[in-house]
């Protein structure tokens, strides 16, 4: 098997180049040349994906904040009810 040099291109594509679906005759296998830009639809889909991720993160944060706030209200109101109960018991005992 001879080494592939510049003159072998005249013979045509090699076996691997024939079966490589990414190989392009114009760029000789360089995948960065001739790649297509994303379409407007693909760009919008990417932006939409990022927006959904950001909204989901924001929703999760809001949910956590609401849960913490509800817990504070619950503990605060139970402390207030306990205080009122103690005051009632004190006044009842002093009579």
Image (spheres, grey):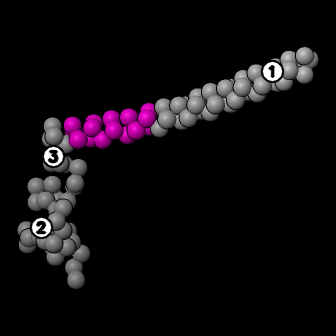
Residue bounds of the magenta highlight: 43-59
For discs 2 and 3, the disc positioned in front in the rendered view: 3
Q: Looking at the picture, how far across and down is residue 40, in whole percent?
A: 15, 37
Q: Which type of secondary structure does the marked residue at label 3 adopt? A: loop
Q: CA distance from mark 1 to mark 2?
A: 100 Å
Q: Any mark on residue 88, and which?
A: 1
Q: Looking at the picture, how far across and down is residue 5, in whole percent?
A: 20, 68
Q: Is residue 19 left or right of residue 54?
A: left
Q: Write down the quadrant of residue 12 in the picture.
A: bottom left
Q: CA distance from mark 2 to mark 3?
A: 26 Å
Q: Is residue 59 above or below residue 87?
A: below
Q: Looking at the picture, how far across and down is residue 27, in whole percent?
A: 15, 54
The residue at which mark 3 appears reads as 36
Residue at (62% x, 27% y) in the render: 73
Q: Write down the quadrant of residue 21 in the picture.
A: bottom left
Label 2: how many residues lie within 10 Å, few (<14), some (14-19) or many (20+)? few
Residue 45 in the magenta stretch? The answer is yes
The residue at which mark 2 appears reads as 9
Whichever of labels 3 and 1 marks the residue nearer the N terminus, that label is 3
Q: Which type of secondary structure does the marked residue at label 2 adopt? A: helix
Q: Is residue 1 left or right of residue 87?
A: left
User: Can the viewer see residue 83?
Assistant: no
Q: Is residue 87 left or right of residue 77?
A: right
Foreground: 53 or 26? 53
């Amino acid at each position: 098997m001879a080494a592939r040099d510049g003159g072998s291109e005249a013979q045509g594509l090699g076996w691997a180049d024939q079966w490589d679906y990414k190989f392009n005759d114009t760029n000789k296998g360089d995948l960065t040349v001739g790649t297509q830009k994303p379409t407007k639809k693909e760009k919008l889909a990417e932006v939409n994906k990022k927006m959904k991720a950001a909204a989901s993160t924001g929703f999760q944060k809001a949910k956590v904040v609401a849960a913490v706030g509800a817990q504070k209200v619950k503990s605060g109101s139970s402390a207030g009810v306990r205080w009122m109960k103690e005051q009632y018991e004190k006044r009842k005992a002093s009579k």
